[in-house]
Image (cartoon, rainbow, N blue to C red):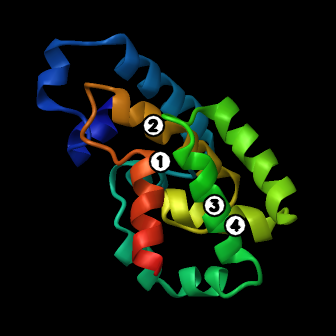
Amino acid sequence: MRALLAERGWLRDSYSSQHDERTESWLSDAAKWLGPQASDRESLARLVGLIFHYEPSEVLAAPEAHAVLLRKGAREVVRALASEALACETIDSDRFKEIVNALKKKVGHSGRGLFHPIRLALAGKVGEGELDRVIVLIDRAAAAPGLAPVKTIRTRILEFCAALD
């Protein structure tokens, strides 16, 4: 994982001489959670890249984004997600589960009707469970001093909603 991040410019140059616990923990968890989801090094790079590169205008320009957002209730899910995500400073695995459960109750959707808008808004892509792992790594990556800058969940949802309207 370290070599992949270094070659893509996602590991700060100064990090090689100054290891810190948050970055080491993030690197370990990213390898453990994303590695098994990738069939090869390039697919792993694409998954990790979702953490480091997020531009809502690019996300919304994709045909798959239009397909998701045209589904009944998708924008309602995004609005409810924004409300939940903005109510907390950071999102970890436990908080993500709480948000998903709160959204299920608020909007009455489950499965793809719930998860595709969430994944689109936060990971910038439509997909399956591997994107949930990406999402729970985002705020930790943003707080890890050894990693390149990462937009937090709060920033992502604000930018996504602004680009959506």
Q: Residues within 10 Å of mark 3 (few under 14, many from 20)?
A: many
> N-terminal of the two: label 1 or label 4?
4
Going by the numbered disc 2, the residue's amino acid type is: Asp
> N-terminal of the two: label 3 or label 4?
4
* Mark-to-mark CA distance, 2 and 1: 6 Å
> N-terminal of the two: label 4 or label 2?
4
* Secondary structure found at label 4: helix
Q: Which residue is mark 3?
A: 118
Q: Which residue is mark 2?
A: 139
As drawn, 55 above or below 9? below
As drawn, 51 above or below 35? below
Left-right relation of 121 to 151:
right
The label nearer to you, 3 versus 4, is 4
Who is closer to the viewer here, 23 or 122? 122
> N-terminal of the two: label 2 or label 3?
3
Q: Which residue is mark 1?
A: 153
Q: Residues within 10 Å of mark 4 (few under 14, many from 20)?
A: many
Q: Position of residue 124 (x, y in %)?
A: 48, 64
Badges 2 and 1: C-beta atoms under 8 Å apart? yes
> N-terminal of the two: label 2 or label 1?
2
